[in-house]
């Protein structure tokens, strides 16, 4: 078996309007029964994710907050992969009236067009922080953190290589982790910029595309893809 792990984004990929349908959950169960590891890679904070997706324990690991932490669903334990921004940064955003404002274990999140205020506060404070966009969302993280660094840490925990991973996503913040995977797949509803760099684009949108990919994995380890992915090293 070539692909030993399946890494998927949540919103717009696995989930439609924030929820995962029953057919997709059953497909995930079949994939897990095939012996593969399941990794969820998301920008969401863990309490919010657990609230909307009670089947979270299907996944072996979750890379949360856009790569800033790893969560073990069965044990309900999380491990931060970076330090959070200073509290003074959050205080200043609140003082300037930035709303909505969500503060996770590491990530600080808001929405467009608040990025202008966020960037000003970062610059004025001389902070080593980056701003990551995700279809209207604005996430602030340490400069070294993204979905790829989080996925790499998760794979190390599972003793797996990126060469044994197929990943799927839909948005600009998914590009980093799909580039890390041996086979990076975009669902049909993905941004054009992501499709252009993907190894494969599904026929189905969002969860339909995820199920399509899962069935191809179970059937023959993606050997029948029209555009084969790179050769495992």
Image (cartoon, rainbow, N blue to C red):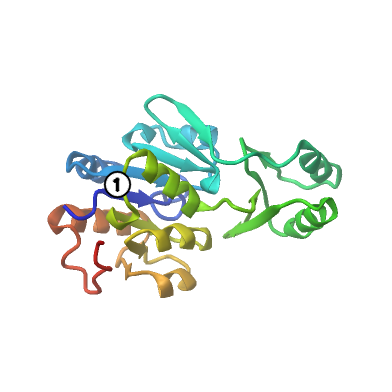
Residue 13 occupies quadrant: bottom left
Q: Left or right of 163: which side holds 216?
A: left
Q: Left or right of 151: which side holds 216?
A: left
- Residue furthest to the left in view is 219
* Residue where numbered disc 1 is placed: 24
Residue nearest the viewer, comparing 206 with 46: 46
> Where is residue 56 drawn, in percent x and y?
38, 35
SS category of the residue bearing label 1? helix
Query: What is the count of numbered marks?
Result: 1
Q: Confirm whether residue 41 shows in the render.
A: no
> Where is residue 1 drawn, in percent x and y?
16, 52
Q: Confirm whether residue 35 shows in the render.
A: yes
Quadrant including the C terminus: bottom left
**Vertical position of residue 115 compared to residue 56: above or below:** below
- Residue furthest to the top in view is 75
Residue at 37% across / 45% down in the picture? Answer: 155
Give neighbour class at mark 1: few <14, some 14-19, many 20+ (Cα, 10 Å).
some
Residue nearest the viewer, comparing 5 with 58: 5
Residue 58 occupies quadrant: top left
Residue at 17% across / 43% down in the picture? Answer: 34
Q: Left or right of 135: which side holds 97?
A: right
> Where is residue 72 drawn, in percent x and y?
41, 31
Residue at 23% across / 71% down in the picture? Answer: 228
Q: Left or right of 117: which side holds 185?
A: left
Residue nearest the viewer, comparing 197 with 191: 197
């Amino acid at each position: 078996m070539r692909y030993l792990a399946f890494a998927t984004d949540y919103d717009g990929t696995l989930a439609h309007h924030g929820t995962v349908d029953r057919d997709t959950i059953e497909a995930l169960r079949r994939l897990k029964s095939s012996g593969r590891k399941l990794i969820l890679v998301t920008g969401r904070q863990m309490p919010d994710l657990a609230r909307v997706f009670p089947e979270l324990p299907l996944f072996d690991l979750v890379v949360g907050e856009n790569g800033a932490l790893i969560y073990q669903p069965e044990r309900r334990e999380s491990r931060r992969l970076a330090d959070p921004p200073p509290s003074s940064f959050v205080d200043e955003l609140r003082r300037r009236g930035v709303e909505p404002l969500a503060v996770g274990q590491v990530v600080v999140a808001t929405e467009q067009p608040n990025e202008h205020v966020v960037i000003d506060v970062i610059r004025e404070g001389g902070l080593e922080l980056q701003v990551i966009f995700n279809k209207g969302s604005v996430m602030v993280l340490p400069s070294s953190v993204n979905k790829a660094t989080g996925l790499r840490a998760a794979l190390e925990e599972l003793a797996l290589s990126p060469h044994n991973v197929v990943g799927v996503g839909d948005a600009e913040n998914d590009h980093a982790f799909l580039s890390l995977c041996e086979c990076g797949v975009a669902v049909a509803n993905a941004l054009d910029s992501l499709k252009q760099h993907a190894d494969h684009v599904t026929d189905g949108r969002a969860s339909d595309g995820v199920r399509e990919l899962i069935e191809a994995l179970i059937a023959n380890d993606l050997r029948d893809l029209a555009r084969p992915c790179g050769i495992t090293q």
